[in-house]
Image (tube, coloured by chain):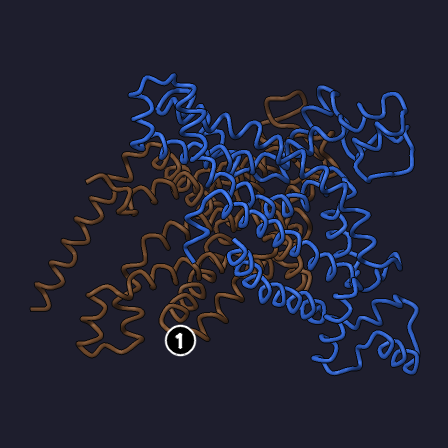
Amino acid sequence: MLRFFLTRVGLLAPTFLGVTVVAFIFVRLIPGDPVEVMVGEMGISPERHAELLARLGLDLPLWEQYLRYLGGLFQGDLGVSIVTKQPVLHEFFTLLPATLELSFCAITAAILLGLPLGILAATRQGSAFDHTVMASSLAGYSMPIFWWGPLLIILFSGVLGWTPVSGRISLLYFFEPVTGFMLIDSLLSGEPGAFTSALGHLILPTIVLGTIPMAVIARQTRSAMLEVLGEDYVRTARAKGLPASRVIGLHALRNALIPVVTVIGLQVGVLMAGAVLTETIFSWPGIGKWMVDSIFRRDYPSVQGGLLLIAAIVMLVNLIVDLLYGLINPRIRHRN
Amino acid sequence: MSATATLTVTADARRELREFWFYFSENRGAVAGFAVVLAVVLTAVFADFIAPHSPVEQFRDHLLQPPAWQDGGSWTFPLGTDAVGRDMLSRLIHGSQYSLLIGCIVVVLSLTFGVLLGLVAGFSGRAVETVIMRVMDVILSFPSLLLALVLVAILGPSLGNAMIAVAVVILPHFVRLTRASVLAERSREYVTASRVAGAGTPRLMFSTVLPNCMAPLIVQATLSFSTAILDAAALGFLGMGAQPPTPEWGTLLADSRDLILRAWWVVTFPGLMILVTVLSINLMGDGLRDALDPRLKRS
């Protein structure tokens, strides 16, 4: 197991180095002079310009700049935002809980709905229920979520007036963030109604962000179940006279879950891409919206840092899923 | 001699096509998807004849007019008008041209470079292969839309750059698929036979091995077509794709963001077009996979 772990981590190291190179190069490829972007419209004398360049280390040769950047990374220094003058790392981790909260709710909802739907569809293969699940999951998979969000807002906020349009909590409530997770903070604040308000604000973004993962999970669960249900040992279990619930729930599901776990892990990248759109639609103050805003504000240190940290999170989660996969399935562990 | 050869080839091709259609048409969803895609293609080709108005003409007396069946609507503008009085239906019809164009160009770009890189990775030594595959891993480490977004920020927001960005983002799938197929085929006897007969590496790559790797690539190309349309529309929605007044469907949605609660038709129809088109292409892709993948074929 240790060897398996080390191989996987070893494979990841060069990829991560590649990611740092991409994040480093990208920002230098953006047209325009970074110092001029920083000072804005005011204009600047040539001496001051050179001084600022030197202070940012931009007068050094490219490889030296990269080594400095890499050295900074290992000390947790990702630069300072041009707009807010705050360290990028600090900004990122202030906003991360909002995205984590939303992503967690979305993936939980997706699993809670997608898994049973996939199992039921597989056990009723060819039925009207199966066709409905497959059709709606294909629709969910094809969904332009930047349209799905506004559509739900029209229906549930506009016509029915059930849910708020945007934000994380009603403006009536104000309390100091403790954990950064609004559901927990609103409970801790002890203000009546705060938790309900936070929950209400979460519903639509959760649906929007969870739609594609749910569709993928339902489809994958169904096909994995169908494959397992055709295996000999399932037939044996049935022949022994075990009740259907036990055959499906115990014998089939345990083995069918292995590919499903992988697919759930792969949704992290999907969630991060989806967060960019969902947070923009619902003005959700997380890292997705922050990335979009930073791109439009030409806040390059933030774009660079955000890109790197998001890629790092995605890689880390994929590594964990990979290791879990090796843990559940010895065949994978011993193959290499 | 050559005439007979051509004859057999066309007969073979016809038989293969018939066999393909036999398996493809068994999947009713795939046929329905194919029909819708065909309809969208025809709409795009004949947009100038079908559309009742110009997509950019502004009817200043008819701002935000609702669809015909609602109070205040009229059949002059069947699906209503937008905030500056342009006919929604005409804009949607012309928008189909952009979506199909985006899909085609992105897939052609990605497929061409992906197949080339995949073939090189599969046929070259370990060093070149490692470099190519690691670079693809790096691209895959970023959430696709985010990477595309930053790429467009570097290149400057426009439809062309959005297409390049999306092509880069989906490139690794083609490279990986081609390489995997090449590695599976390379050790087969027909390849060895061809090599012994004196075929050079380029000939082995393109003429011996590549034709036998096409089935999964065609399926992947179809599915990437829908991804390309979705991602390019998402970029348009974020203001980083096609720029107004281009009637690209994602850009139409971006225009309507402030009107969500005032004019439902401006929001609903462009997204519906994206959903229907993408869904149909995905349905078609599923059918193609069943028809082209010999492992799933019932003998």
What percent of the width, then of the height, locates residue B143? 61, 52
Q: Quadrant of the C terminus of chain A?
A: bottom left
Image quadrant in which you'd find residue A73? bottom right
Check the residue under mark 1 and report the chain it is in.
B
Image quadrant in which you'd find residue A156? top right
Taking depth in this image into account, of A239 and A151 the one nearest to the observer is A239
Q: Residue at x 67, y 33 (%)?
A: A105
Taking depth in this image into account, of A244 and A36 the one nearest to the observer is A244
Q: Is residue A272 left or right of residue B94?
A: right
Image quadrant in which you'd find residue A284? top right
Identified by mark 1, the residue type is Gly
Using the image, determine if residue A154 lies above or below residue B135: above
Mark yes or no: residue B284 visible.
Answer: yes
Mark 1 burial class by Cα count in 10 Å: few <14, some 14-19, many 20+ = few
- Find disc 1 in the rendering and name its residue: B125
Using the image, determine if residue A111 lies above or below residue B238: above
Q: Is residue A276 left or right of residue B219?
A: right
Mark yes or no: residue B163 visible.
Answer: no
Count of picture labels:
1
What percent of the width, then of the height, locates residue A319? 58, 52
Tell me the colour chain A is drawn in. blue
Judging by colour alone, the chain drawn in brown in this rendered image is: B
Q: Is residue A102 left or right of residue B28?
A: right
Q: Residue at x 47, y 39 (%)?
A: A258
Q: Residue at x 73, y 25 (%)?
A: A157
